[in-house]
Every structure is written in structure tokens, then in C-alpha cells.
Amino acid sequence: MAPSGEPTTVLDRCLATPPPGLVSRMSLRLSFFDVLWLHAPPVQRLVFYEIPEITKTNFIEEIIPKLRDSLNLTLKYYIPLAGNLIIPPNSGPDSPEILYKRGNSVPLIVAESNAMDFEWLVANHARDSSDFHCLVPKLVQSTDDSGSILSSVLALQVTLFPNMGFSIGITSHQAAGDACTIFRFSRIWAFHAKAGEAEAEEKVNAPCGGPLGPPCYYRTIIKDPKGLSSIFWNRWNSISKLDRGSGISSNSYKVRQTFLISPEQVENIRKLVPPMLRGQAYMKSFKVVCAYVWICLVKSRGEEAVDEEEVENFVCFGNCRRRLDHLVAENYFGNCITLCIAKMKNGELVGGGGIPRAVGLIGAAMNEKLQSQEALSNGAENWLVDLQNLNLDRTFMVAGSPKFNFYQLDFGWGRPRRFEFVSIDKTGAVSLCGGRDRNRDIEVGLSLPKARMDAFAAIFNQGLKDL
């Protein structure tokens, strides 16, 4: 039985393991792209599936075995996810590794909701952010006899909502892999569950597996001529454990809400940009949506908080795969993203002509970074410092991308009813995801104090009506 007042009851704690007889040991050294995220907070994603006729018996006897068995098969290709991130004491930047040893596993929690309102959780309106925390697992951390820090790199939780459906919580260590890595793993897991072992294995092992192809582990592809691993390592070691969370949003009461932008609305926003600029590469939907949300977010602070000379920050991360001189495949396992930062004075952003200026600034920052390998790492020695010095109250940071649409994860029970990026509660980021019903729709997820969320919603919705 759950303690009184607990929102969920743990029914079982399973361990998912790669099929036997594969490898007894597998080690992956971290690239500089990975070391950047060595002590960053974990990424937490949550997907809800609606099955009105679901019972506890059906959940335990059919759904959980199907998810567990397909997960075991998927780990055949993603062995490192069953391992641990190991950070030895008094070591150098080449020492941290993701190490799998036979017997390691991915923790899988099986839980049941205690009268939590499924329909309330999957709605678009504002909901208490803390209600979602019990639906995503924590990474397991420990210290061995040598003083090395060990952390699981993946943890999963499946929670039953009787007569309504279930949710899958996915928590991953940022140093293990970026959104592309975790999304590809999730798609292969879902495909194994839906299609069955034989069809899934044939598809994954096809010569051109595409998005369902197995991961690439060739770490030598990532070159580090600037010694960025050492720079990031030394920076992390110069920061106390308490200060490593200084870039994390406060734990004050927040609500989360999802806003939908349609392709037609994106086009209406795009029309605010002068005609001679609309054909530019930076006019893509991602950048147009980011510009609009950025302005709404700044305006939602209220007039009393406005300082026209104050600098507002925009932060996103660009995928470097296929952009490095040594071509990195889309199925590369790990982190391969560059930091893009744009800055604009408050008065220029929220004043007349703010949208075309913001679109242009965001587009220029991203295009500049993604134009060549040299540009990708320009200023990279300061990335960690730049991120840690950001004023979160003046920063719009993007988490996720419409390209990684978690609504595509069909485990055999249809598309998800709702996707939530739970970790934005702590990071203060704004999540972007493709739409559920139309892939070209874009969902915008925020976690803010209630008063500011109300202000944002009013500005956001009225702005779209006025276009």
C-alpha cells in the first residue's frame, strides 16, 4: 500500500537487460560534446497513452511484459544505456566513461496512480507542475569503494491510470546522449513493441535502416583540436557541487501549460517579416515560432519589470551531425550539438518591428554556427561559462525540437494522448514538439508561476488572433 496521500503506488521494480551472450563489457569515452553536460540536470520526458478499457490485470499481465520484453530487445542495440556513467575521483577529462558490464540494467519502475485525474493531466490548460514529478523516475547514483561517482544513464517508469490509460516516463543523463539519441532509442523501442521481434529486427538491420537503424558508436569521429574536453572538465571541477545547480530555475510553485501553433498561424507570423526577407533560410517555422514565443515571454513579465536597455537572451542547440568535416551520421550515439545564443535589448524586442528583428537575429545566430565545422565550435571554450552566467529571468532557452516528435511513439496502443517535457520545471526552458494530430503543428510547453502563465496565455492567444 502507498503511504497516505502518495499520488502513486509502486507495484514492481524491474531490471531491463540486453539479451544474453552479446558482450561482457563495453566502454564509451565521452567526447567534448558529452563533457559539456557532465553535471547537468537529467532530462525528463513523459508520454501518456489513452486506453479507456485498461484494467490492472491487463496492465500487469499484458502491457508491462510487452514493454519490458521489447525494451530488452532494444537494448541489444543500445547496450550503453544499460550501463553507468563513471566519474573517477582526482582524474582527467579522458577518464569519465559510460561503462556497461554484464549484469548491468536499466531500472524500470511499474506504478499505479492513486486517483490522479488522467484527463486533467493531459489537458492543455494550466496544471500544477509538481503533479507530474511522481510520473518520471530518478537516475540511480552511488559512489564505489574507489570514490568514483556512478550514475545510471537511463531510467524508466510506466504508471497505470485505471480505466484511462498509462504513462511512460523517460529520464536520461544529458552526458549520455542528446535529443536525437534518446528519440531514436525510443522509436526503436516502440517499433519492437508494436511490430514484434521478427519484423523489428528485420527493419532495424536493413541496409538503409533510416530512423530505425542501429546506433553508431565511433567516437573517433569527434575531433577535439581545441582541447575542449579539458576546458569543460576543469570548469566543472572549479564549481562547487552546490553551485552546479545555479543555472536551475527556482522550486517556487509553478504551473505547466501547452500551446499549439498551426502552420497557418506560422505563416501569418511570417507575413510580418518584410517580403524581401521571407525567402531566407532563417524563415523556417522553428525560428518564426521561437521569435513569437520569445516576445510573448518577455512581455508577460509586466510593464513594471520592463527595462528597455536590459539584454534579453535566446538560447538553442543545433544538431551538428552531417555538418562536421568528418561526417557524423544521424544515428551517432551521444551528444553532437552546438550552442547558439542571440541577444537583443528589451526595447528592440517588444517594440514595433520586434518579430522581424527577432526572427532575423535567431536565424543569423543559427546559420552562422551551422555553416562550417570551424563555426560550430567558435567560442566553444566559453560555452559552459556562458550558460552558467545567463540571467534565467532574461533568458528564453529551447528544449526539444519539432523534428523529434514523441507523438510518433506508437507501442501498439496508438499515438500518445499527450507529451510533456517535465524537466523544464527545473531548467526554466520552453519545450517545442511536433503536434499530435498534424505533424506540422508545433506544441509549445512552458512551466511558469501561475500569474505569469496567465499573462503569457493572454498575450500569446491575443497575438495570434490579431495576426
Image (cartoon, rainbow, N blue to C red):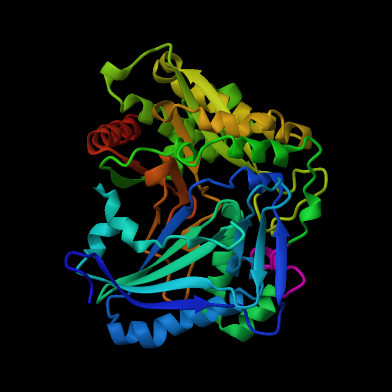
* Residue sitting at x 37%, y 45%: 425
* Residue sitting at x 60%, y 59%: 85
When the figure is inspected, residue 189 is found, relative to residue 341, above or below; the finding is: below
Quadrant assignment for the N terminus = bottom left
Q: Quick one: 408 or 384, which is closer to the camera? A: 384
> Outermost residue toward the left?
4
Q: Quick one: 216 or 123, which is closer to the camera? A: 216
Q: Quick one: 406 or 463, which is closer to the camera? A: 406
Q: In the figure, residue 340 lies in which quadrant?
A: top right
The answer to whether one can see residue 123 in this image is: no
The answer to whether one can see residue 417 in this image is: yes
* Residue sitting at x 48%, y 29%: 271
Region of the chain picked out in magenta, as a range: 205-216
Q: x%, y% of residue 330?
A: 69, 55
Q: Is residue 164 magenta?
A: no
When the figure is inspected, residue 353 is found, relative to residue 193, above or below; the finding is: above
Q: Is residue 214 left or right of residue 412?
A: right
Q: x%, y% of residue 336?
A: 67, 47
Majority SS type along the magenta span: loop
Q: Is residue 212 magenta?
A: yes
* Residue sitting at x 51%, y 38%: 240
When the figure is inspected, residue 230 is found, relative to residue 420, above or below; the finding is: above
| Image label count | 0
Q: x%, y% of residue 341?
A: 57, 29
Q: x%, y% of residue 299?
A: 33, 25
Quadrant assignment for the C terminus = top left
Q: Quick one: 373 or 39, which is closer to the camera? A: 39
Q: Is residue 7 left or right of residue 426?
A: left
> Outermost residue toward the front?
145
